[in-house]
Image (cartoon, grey):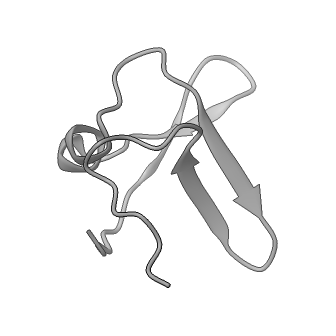
Amino acid sequence: MPHEEARKIIKAGKTSFAIILPKAWLRFYGLKNGDLVKVVSDSTVTIEPLERRKHERAPQG
């Protein structure tokens, strides 16, 4: 499910900020409120589910 979309950074509390994830993305990966995701930052920022879900394709090889 390659997908690119602009999202706005919003203030969440006094010292934190958040990005709202698209509902379709959450549905595709079977994620719900309270689930954990991994955030990787280097020259880009990547957000991915901690656990593989049924909709995610297995690596080819």
Q: Quadrant of residue 54?
A: top left
44 horizontally vs 30: left or right: right
- Tell me: residue 17, above or below residue 12: below
- Tell me: residue 56, above or below residue 34: below
Q: Nearer the viewer, residue 38 or 8?
A: 38
Q: Nearer the viewer, residue 16 or 30?
A: 30
Residue 18 lies, in percent from the top left, at 54, 37
60 horizontally vs 26: left or right: right
Q: Looking at the image, which residue is at 41% across and 64% down?
A: 58
Which image quarter holds the N terminus? bottom left
Residue 29 lies, in percent from the top left, at 32, 44
Q: Looking at the image, which residue is at 34% across and 63% down?
A: 57
Q: Looking at the image, which residue is at 50% across and 85% down?
A: 61
Residue 55 lies, in percent from the top left, at 25, 49
- Tell me: residue 46, above or below residue 9: below
Residue 41 lies, in percent from the top left, at 77, 63
